[in-house]
Image (cartoon, grey):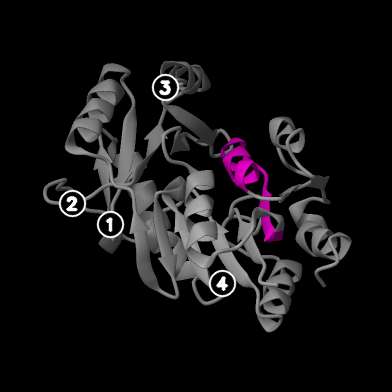
Amino acid sequence: MQKIFFFDIDGTLAIRGVIPESNLKALQLLKERGYLTFICTGRSPFYAQSLFSHLVSGLVTCNGRYILYQGQKLHGEAFSKKELLYYQNKIKDLNAGAMFVSDEVAIPYLLDDKQIQEIQNEYGPSHIQESIQDLSFYTFDLFYHSLKQRDTLIEAFKEELVINDHGGHGSCDCSTIGFDKGDGIAYLLNYFDIDRDNAYAFGDGYNDQAMFREVGHGIAMGNAVEELKQKATYITDSIDCDGIMKALQHEGIV
């Protein structure tokens, strides 16, 4: 029976882009057994591809809205022009900034020079452009200047977005309530004709609750937020204590 596994990146599979040796071994074992494995992240397609595409079958990026399989784009849920303008205007009114994510590039919006330099350092200058013309956008990161402003953003967007803070460092990724990680997973379960009982998701953040909604096995890392642990079918150890491998052993996979 075919099984499929979904892994959040930050705090689940990797720490600041570095995958612990135990997690690399876990991915290799799943590959050897012929199982499907997918990254499932709020990160951009080009970021996930550059670091993880050689390790997994495919990528669910942009919090579910952009899916690749074997290196090819399988599905994209782009914002309409009306939606994009709405978000731009609301971000401007809230005196915040953003980074809008397209297929191969990201566009800074109302970011200062320091913030632009930071995203160029993280994603590479070639992936950061200035023009928003003639591009499709699938998600955006919000940027704030204080924790008070972050909390204001969370409240202002609560009917539209699940905002996942990047550790209090001035930015957060946004999962749209209309199409999220769970919807991306549902698309793939239908595409491969796999039952939810054979689907496993590993996560640690607020936006990972959407993953657990669609799978039979929702596994929260020991370092996960409490809200996610409450929805998990199993709580494993933390990322730096072989949590993924221990969970796969508990589930009888390896």
> Which is nearer the eye, 31 or 127?
31
Could you tell whether 101 is left or right of 27 in the image?
Answer: left
Work out whether 138 lies above or below 9. Answer: above
Residue 163 point in image, percent of width and height: 49, 31
Is label 3 in a helix, a strand or a loop? loop
In the figure, residue 24 lies in which quadrant? bottom right
**Closest to the observer: 132 or 138?**
138
Percent across and percent down for residue 198 are: 69, 61
Number of the label disc, if any, that sits on residue 157: 3
* For the residues bearing labels 4 and 3, Cβ distance under 8 angstroms: no
Q: Which mark is residue 105?
A: 1
Crowd rating for badge 3 (residues with CA inside 10 Å; few <14, some 14–19, many 20+):
some
Q: Nearer the viewer, mark 2 or mark 1?
A: 2
Q: Are marks 2 and 1 in contact (CB under 8 Å)?
A: yes
Residue picked out by circle 4: 56
What's the CA distance linking mark 1 and mark 3? 24 Å
In the image shown, does 103 or 194 lie closer to the viewer?
194
Are circles 4 and 2 on residues that touch, CB within 8 Å?
no
Could you tell me how far apart the alpha carbons at marks 1 and 4 are, in whole angstroms?
22 Å
Residue at (70, 66) in percent of width and height = 20
Q: Given the image, on which type of amino acid does mark 3 rest?
A: Phe
Is 204 inside the magenta-drawn segment? yes
| Type of the residue with mark 1 | Val
Mark 2 and mark 3 in contact? Answer it, CB < 8 Å: no
Crowd rating for badge 1 (residues with CA inside 10 Å; few <14, some 14–19, many 20+): many
Q: Is residue 14 visible?
A: no
Residue lying furthest bottom: 32
Q: What secondary structure is found at the residue carrying circle 4?
A: loop
Residue 166 is inside the magenta segment: no
Q: Going 79% across and 50% down the picture, which residue do you hit?
A: 238
**238 on left or right of 100:** right
Q: Which residues are magenta?
A: 198-214
